Image (tube, rainbow, N blue to C red):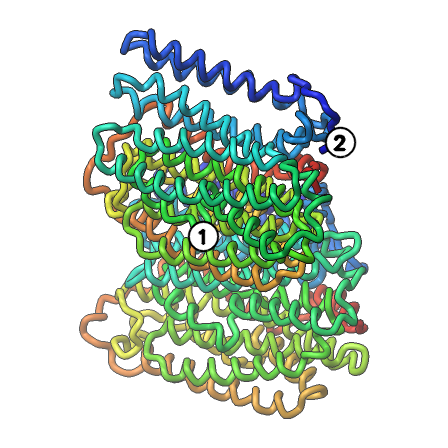
Amino acid sequence: MLSVAIFLPLAGAIALLLVKGFTERTARLFAIATSVVPLAIMVAAWVRFDGGAGFDLVESVPWIPTLGVGYRVGVDGVSLPLAAMTALLFLVCVAYPVELRGKPRHYFAAFLFLEAASLGVFLALDLFLFYVFFDISLVGMYFLIAVWGHGDSQRSALKFFLYTLAGSLVMLLAILGLYLASDPRTFDMAELIRQQPLDGDGLRAGLVFLAFVVGFGVKTPIVPFHTWLPPAHVDAPGPASTVLAGVLLKMGTYGFVRILLSMMPETFQRFALPVAIVGVVSIVYGALVALGQSNVKRMIAYSSVNHMGYVILGVAAAAAGMGNDEDGARLALSGATLEMVAHGLITGALFLLAGSIWTRAETYEVDELGGLAGRAPAMTGAIGLAAFASLGLPGLAGFVAEFQIFAGTFAIYPVLAGIALLGIVITAALFLRMLQKAFLGALPDRWLAWPDLTRTEVAALVPVLALVVVIGVAPSWVLDVIDTTASTLVNGP
Amino acid sequence: MGGMGGMDMPVGSVGPEIFLIVGAVTTLVYALFAPRKAQAGAAVLALVTIAVTAVASAVMLRGSQELTFFDTYAADDVAVWAKLIILVIGAVTIGLSVEWFATDPRHGEYYALLLLAVLGAIVLAGAADLMAIILGLLLSSATGYVLAAFHRTSARSGEAAIKYYLLGALTNGALVYGAVLLFGLGATTTLIGLTGALPGADTTALVAGTALMILGLAFKLGAVPAHAWVPDVADGAPAPVAAFLTVAPKVGALIAIARLVLTLPEDQVGWRLLVAVLAAATMTLGNLAALWQDDVRRLLGWSAVSQAGYGLMGVVALGRSDLAIPSLLFFLVAYAVANLAAFGVVIELRGRADRGTYAGLATAQPLLALVLVISFLSLVGVPPLAGFTAKLALFGAVIDAGYTWLAVLAVANTVVSLAYYLRVVAPAYFTPLEAPLPVLGTWARAATLVSGAAVVVLGILAGPLLHSFDVSRLLPG
């Protein structure tokens, strides 16, 4: 069943490339129809998810037996919410209107290709397969930014590709380190979790751990590996930014949980403090730099660095608390996982809306906007909701996640949690300032005819923003799923 | 002497080589007597020869795994796989050549030479004796010089051939001298004999002999310090010849190096470190030089140099990692198909060199553009293409062998390589079509598309091939 979610979009992408008869409208409808299926599958997986130990809906076929590689997919409490969020965001993104440069078939093919890769990353239960999907997501995003981006998009796309490929390759070395230490040698995640191959192996475990942190850190991104992110975001088309922030960044943080926390918990515990400090640095630095931006997209991009910092802090706190402060650890870990989902939805919506601003004004400069609230109430409302969610307003998804992260972290790293709170304050300031500048005040004459959100845009945004509210008000249906895995993980090495 | 094979000359164990000679001579005779417009028939003869030879080779898989012909020639699975790889390279090259040489009134001879060049590489891969190594090296080199100069009226073709020849003469001489030293130390030319005779020999002479022989083989491989010919040949030689010369001799040379180092007493000759340093220098130099190339053919030449560096990683791990032999063989397969596919695109575009003139390729020739991207990404090592599995296995092998630094350096090089490959992809995909892009013809297109498809298929279906490589034996190890 899960394989269909991965390979149907891939087949759709190939069909779009091969069949020349598609118009923009039919290509879009085809892409929407294709990406409804993975979402339906994720919903079905959610409904039948029973929360037992281990992985659910597992499919396993030998692939390269000589190397211990198998085609293995499945879900657990961490990957299911992320995969479901991914399927939803892709559906919304292909539906979202954007300038297609006369290449609709290729645009939607790139999106569906990227969807297959992204779902593959979260569903893979084999490190080889995980790496395959992790890496091909770069190729899809490279073309999306370079062909349908604006500004200096080729340069940004190249920078994105080079940086993140460097990160993936460092991760590949780490994967090999883990693989070579396993006995019998295997890339099977479940087997590696059982074997814990590098437990108690001092220097080697440390190096492999460091390589994983760097590899995932580039993707997440954590400071100082974040410099590829702002240009990629600014020059990418809106929906591609949404996928980049909402889905691709999660691949890094997901790796922290899926691999480091599950396969080398002892080592993670040893290095939890430095990782937590890196998380806090990302939180504060990301927020401060975001505060200094006048470009809406650049600002959201840096706020992503800030939010990913919360995730890293939560995961590190969970690693530190494993086996000794299990309640704190469980709280921090499920908070971090929920933050991944919440950030995907909230920032995904923000980037779609930034794309809408671009299609109307061809600018992201907040100083050139102003007073739009009267002209475009729907847009103002949507951005307002997303911005408040992003700054952590209670009753919205971001708050639930961040509250849990802080509650869990305070028990384990009180000082770091205190510093990290600064991030929340700064984020609040920057989003409020952005809302004030762009939507309040006097409306410049050139925007007198500013069109409000179209029906398509509203239709695409409603499910995402509705989920932000639903999770904010009643988070237990998500948290229960996450907790099934989080509570097993924090039982300690 | 003595050893595994016994004192006999079982002709059957060199059946493929004999078929190649017979085929080459037949092709040559045909070319001498056929009228001009029937010269292309030589291509068909050559293809038939390769097909027959391939069948004769394939039946030898899982065969005796022994040394034969007085222990001078290996009939192990690695040799058989090398034969098959080189034959496929030969067949693809013929496909790429038919239309390219169609206007040359004497191109029948070309196919005879190509078959002999194939034979040279094959002998090199099977050689288990210093004299056999020399034989394979010289046959491969001598045919290579002529092939590189086959555009007889082109100054650039001549220049490439002369550079190739001069460097070849020097390094082939070095190899012969090295062989003499090793022969003097061990009093035998067979590798199996040297395995027993070399331990305890004078270390200085041993190191000198080894270094000279590796220098000679580095020339065939296109590795530092004998790499300088590669970009010139890639750029100046007839493009199908460039495609052939940047892959086929590599297969023979890499396996010859592997057999040679397995002969040496490791406590006296630190060959592992020596090869690791050569690998590091080769991949780094090739990549840095490729970084600024605007000429796609030169770029492919430098990329071929850097790829030779990756290939040497498999040699570094020999005897220390189970992954060494499968990674080495799989790398050769993956590299060969990707490089042939990339050259194939250049050839199908009539040898188009300046990267700027690839503008709009994706619009005019979407399939060719796709093959270009796929082959480049495979050379980078992006999954699920063949090059990825090869690099994964190579990295795993060297880490397993305790050479993690080499894997780290290879990773850094891989990132660099992406930059220059994308410098060609960018105009092809992101720049509008400026001028029409004339193409060569059906044969070249078919050979290119088949190679491009192989890059994908071998990546996804790597399992059976890797399994076969995993159980392959490499003598005299």
From the viewer's perspective, is residue A146 above or below residue B384?
below
From the viewer's perspective, is residue A331 above or below residue B409?
below
Q: Which of these two is toward me, A70 or A124?
A: A70
Task: Identify the subunit bearing mark 1.
Answer: B
Q: Which of these two is toward me, B415 or B26?
A: B26
- Identify the residue shown where x is 25% and y is 20%: B103
Residue A457 image point, x, y percent: 40, 58
The answer to whether residue B233 shows anywhere in this view is yes
Q: Given the image, on which type of amino acid does mark 1 rest?
A: Val
Residue on which the image places disc 2: B4
Badge count: 2
Residue A104 image point, x, y percent: 36, 45
Residue on which the image places disc 1: B224
Residue B14 image point, x, y percent: 61, 21
Give a yes or no on whether discs 1 and 2 share a subunit. Answer: yes
Residue B325 image point, x, y percent: 65, 43
Which callout, 1 or 2, points to the residue nearer the camera?
A: 2
- Identify the residue shown where x is 59% and y is 41%: B330
